[in-house]
Amino acid sequence: MSISEGLLERRGRVVSDLRRHRRIIVALSGGVDSAVLLGLARNALGQSNVLAITGVSESLAQAELEDARRVASELGTDHEIITTHELDRPAYRANEGDRCFHCRSELFELLTTLAEKRGYDAVAYGAIVDDLGDVRPGMEAARRLGVVAPLLEAGIGKSDVRELAQWMSLHIDDKPASPCLASRIPTGTEVTPERLRQIERAESALRSLGLRLFRVRHHGDIARIEMGEQDFGRILELHASISRAVRSAGFRYVAVDLDGYRAAGAASADPAPVTLYSIAPSRESGQ
């Protein structure tokens, strides 16, 4: 397939920007934005001068890591996994609204240190212009540590990266956005490994049912499911399976949010489930 003239020009700006560097590390998350950045970096600098690195912790779903590995393989780039320890940071665990700053600081500090040790002259991440409309503390962490955002600088947006991903034949060209698992925990509620594992188990089970765009929001005993419009019609058809799947992750109650899927920032800060369809505890509980 071909890409539009305007996008071709913006792509050229990204490549020119990347060529200002000799060797570069790309933070590869498993999402489409960083995947496209990695592909353009390889095109600009060659395989031997680009290293993709994925930070792994309890907040990264296994499915995201698998996508990151597959993207690196599709693009023929070197890929490494590093362990991040944002959960060791009290401010991250406290989850008081600046969680992403502390998470990104952890990752970018590790990457910039690694770049210096190995002779890479830049670290890049996949911020795009759409990110400017949201509260993004992680972007401030990138700015402070000198991490570059070539897609953002070139005016690349979400529709652009999807078109470029399709042009590059990446398997995630239409993948929905998937922020970290901690984004499912309401602001003010502590981020713990146990809560993150519950969320991942529940979302993995729902994915196995064929649902595509959804989030499982953690409200103590209650799992509040936000679903995309395309899946709303399947709620009654799948309600028993949804109940079993989410309860198997350790939740006592299951609720489906009437407002549906929303962006991570606003939704995760909302402490009150709004229920379209609620499933009571199992009879075995005695209630």
Image (cartoon, rainbow, N blue to C red):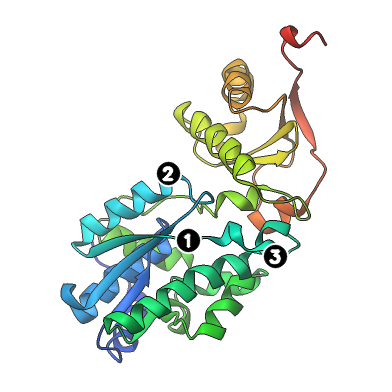
Q: Residue at x 59, y 28 (%)?
A: 249
Image coords of residue 264 (percent x, y): 64, 54
Image coords of residue 33 (percent x, y): 42, 64
Disc 2 or 1, which lies upstream in sequence? 2
Q: Are marks 2 and 3 in contact (CB under 8 Å)?
A: no
Mark 2 Cα-neighbour bin, 10 Å: few <14, some 14–19, many ≥20: some
Q: Residue at x 53, y 30 (%)?
A: 206
Which residue corresponds to mark 1?
Answer: 84
Dot 3 amino acid type: Ala
Numbered mark located on residue 91 in the image? 3
Foreground of the two, 73 or 196 = 196
Q: Residue at x 55, y 84 (%)?
A: 143
Numbered mark located on residue 62 in the image? 2
Snapshot quadrant of residue 219: top right
Q: In the rendered image, which quarter contains the N terminus?
A: bottom left
- How far apart are the alpha carbons under marks 1 and 3? 15 Å
Disc 1 or 3, which lies upstream in sequence? 1
Q: Secondary structure at mark 1?
A: loop
Mark 3 Cα-neighbour bin, 10 Å: few <14, some 14–19, many ≥20: some
- Select label 2 or label 3 by which is in front: 3
